[in-house]
Image (spheres, grey):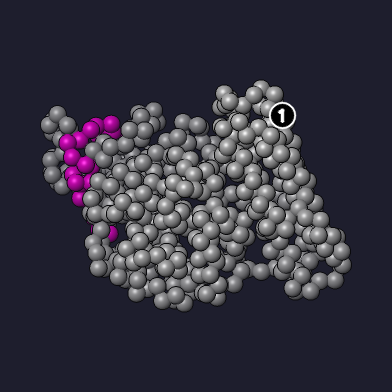
């Protein structure tokens, strides 16, 4: 892993990195052959034209720096073209009933057809998408989804036509950098070391470079790829940019990426649809720019999507759970206010600015949702044993918002601990101790709240933000 690790950190399209391993693993309809003599940068012949690239040859080439970009030196059978890409979208959208409903209701097929057929896509990127489809199908589906939903959100926002196209291509190619990383690393779901997590983050630079080097895309599309893991609250990566530095296209792609995680990964095996992502959207209304949230909300509404909904038979259990979760949230809310107060008393500590902003945002979000309020608790405690469909649905939606809000609090805890771990120089020792104690208290309360959720649900659920950040972040949040 060590050699590949160094390559990943210094991504170069001419390097025989994880992409060469993927090529060597392809067979059948996607069989790979050398399109011309392959030489290293000193001109030494490594592989003759026409030689099949199999796993052992790929392993022998590992680490070599070739005289040309790898995609120019190989021929991959049945590489995606305009026609087959459009067909892939069709198969994907039909597979998920709710996606197809949105597609049909919005009449987006005309736009999709136009995007797929009117312009051609760079060969190097289409070759990588082909490899991704065969080797990393989950990432491929996410790319299709991000292009499709990203385009729809951009259209709903009435962005100018060129920006809608930029959103589409940024969504389609935002993760191509992942095909250059080791397969085991991208497929790994937990237990990432800090180094491995740092490697995962390099896919952003890889995708951005590949988009820029093909010379076919606008600065907006390239910037969007570079920013698809950045967040308006400053909690993203790789640069931790703030809201004023970000463009809307990158945030649309970032949101689409997360909604895929939620809908396809987290809801797997349930009746939940895209409409069930609304609680996530509500508590993260400002994470990707507020207009993006509004447009997504309207889009789902316009398409007539229905959520899985509450099961009235479980009313008693649901009422009990929501009361428990709401009581816990009230305690968490008070602890957050104490943290905000402490941060407000030490504004001279500039390294704590991002945490201060995050805490304020979370408090604002909880307040706007009415969570932690005395009124809400009074209403909950006044509910009787008899259920009606409306109350049941309200409780169901409230519980989903409480669950997503708990993840917001965990984000605060994680960033607070990160800040203290890096030993900020401008934070006085006394304030640092105070901050540590407040975070520990918050951590303890959140842990108790987490426990109060159904164990299975808690274990399966993964913060969509953290899921998109990577399993390492999930590990950190859990530990
Ligand atoms: Fe990504």
Q: Residue at x 35, y 69 (%)?
A: 112
Does the magenta run of residues contain 72? yes
Quadrant containing the C terminus is top right
Q: Residue at x 37, y 73 (%)?
A: 109
Q: Residue at x 79, y 74 (%)?
A: 388
Left or right of residue 27, residue 102 in this image: right
Q: Is residue 311 above or below residue 328?
A: below
Q: Is residue 326 above or below residue 119?
A: above
Left or right of residue 410, residue 10 in this image: left
Q: Is residue 327 above or below residue 39?
A: below
Q: Evaluate whether residue 457 shows in this view.
A: no
Image location of residue 343, percent across then percent down: 66, 36
Q: Residue at x 34, y 66 (%)?
A: 161
Of 57 and 477, the residue lying toward us: 477
Left or right of residue 55, residue 244 in this image: right
Q: Quadrant of residue 398?
A: bottom right
Q: Quadrant of residue 166?
A: bottom left
Per the rendered image, the range of residues in magenta is 56-80
Q: Evaluate whether residue 103 shows in this view.
A: yes
Does the magenta run of residues contain 379? no
The residue wearing badge 1 is 434
Image location of residue 107, percent across then percent down: 41, 76
Left or right of residue 40, residue 353 in this image: right
């Amino acid at each position: 892993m060590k050699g590949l690790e160094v390559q990943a950190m210094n991504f170069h399209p001419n390097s025989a990195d994880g992409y060469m391993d993927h090529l060597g693993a392809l067979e059948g309809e996607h069989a790979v052959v050398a399109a011309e003599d392959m030489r290293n940068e000193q001109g030494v012949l490594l592989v003759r034209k026409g030689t099949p690239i199999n796993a052992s040859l790929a392993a022998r080439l590992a680490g070599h720096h070739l005289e040309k970009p790898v995609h120019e030196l190989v021929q991959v059978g049945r590489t995606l073209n305009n026609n087959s890409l459009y067909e892939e979208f069709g198969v994907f959208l039909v597979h998920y009933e709710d996606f197809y409903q949105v597609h049909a209701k919005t009449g987006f097929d005309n736009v999709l057809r136009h995007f797929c057929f009117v312009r051609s896509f760079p060969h190097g990127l289409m070759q990588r998408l082909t490899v991704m489809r065969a080797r990393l199908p989950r990432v491929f589906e996410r790319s299709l989804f991000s292009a499709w939903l990203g385009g729809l959100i951009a259209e709903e926002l009435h962005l100018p036509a060129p920006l809608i196209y930029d959103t589409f291509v940024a969504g389609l190619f935002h993760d191509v950098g992942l095909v250059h990383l080791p397969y085991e690393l991208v497929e790994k779901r937990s237990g990432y070391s800090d180094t491995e997590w740092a490697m995962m983050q390099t896919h952003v630079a890889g995708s951005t470079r590949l988009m820029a080097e093909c010379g076919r895309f606008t600065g907006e599309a390239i910037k969007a790829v570079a920013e698809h893991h950045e967040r308006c609250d400053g909690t993203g990566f790789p640069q931790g940019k703030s809201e004023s530095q970000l463009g809307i296209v990158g945030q649309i792609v970032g949101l689409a990426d997360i909604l895929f995680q939620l809908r396809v990964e987290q809801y797997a095996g349930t009746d939940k649809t895209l409409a069930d992502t609304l609680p996530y959207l509500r508590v993260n209304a400002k994470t990707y720019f507020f207009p993006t949230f509004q447009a997504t909300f309207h889009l789902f509404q316009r398409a007539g999507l229905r959520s899985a909904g509450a099961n009235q038979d479980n009313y008693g259990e649901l009422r009990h759970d929501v009361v428990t979760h709401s009581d816990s949230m009230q305690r968490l809310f008070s602890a957050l206010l104490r943290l905000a107060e402490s941060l407000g008393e030490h504004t001279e500590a500039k390294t704590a600015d991002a945490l201060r902003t995050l805490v304020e945002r979370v408090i604002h979000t909880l307040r706007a949702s009415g969570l932690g309020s005395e009124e809400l608790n009074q209403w909950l405690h006044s509910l009787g044993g008899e259920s009606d469909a409306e109350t049941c649905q309200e409780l169901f939606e409230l519980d989903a918002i409480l669950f997503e809000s708990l993840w917001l609090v965990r984000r605060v805890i994680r960033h607070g601990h990160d800040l203290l771990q890096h030993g900020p120089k401008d934070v006085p020792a006394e304030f640092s101790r105070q901050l540590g104690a407040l975070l520990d208290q918050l951590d303890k309360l959140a842990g108790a709240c987490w426990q109060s959720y159904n164990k299975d649900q808690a274990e399966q659920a993964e913060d969509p933000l953290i899921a998109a950040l990577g399993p390492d972040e999930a590990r950190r949040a859990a530990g």
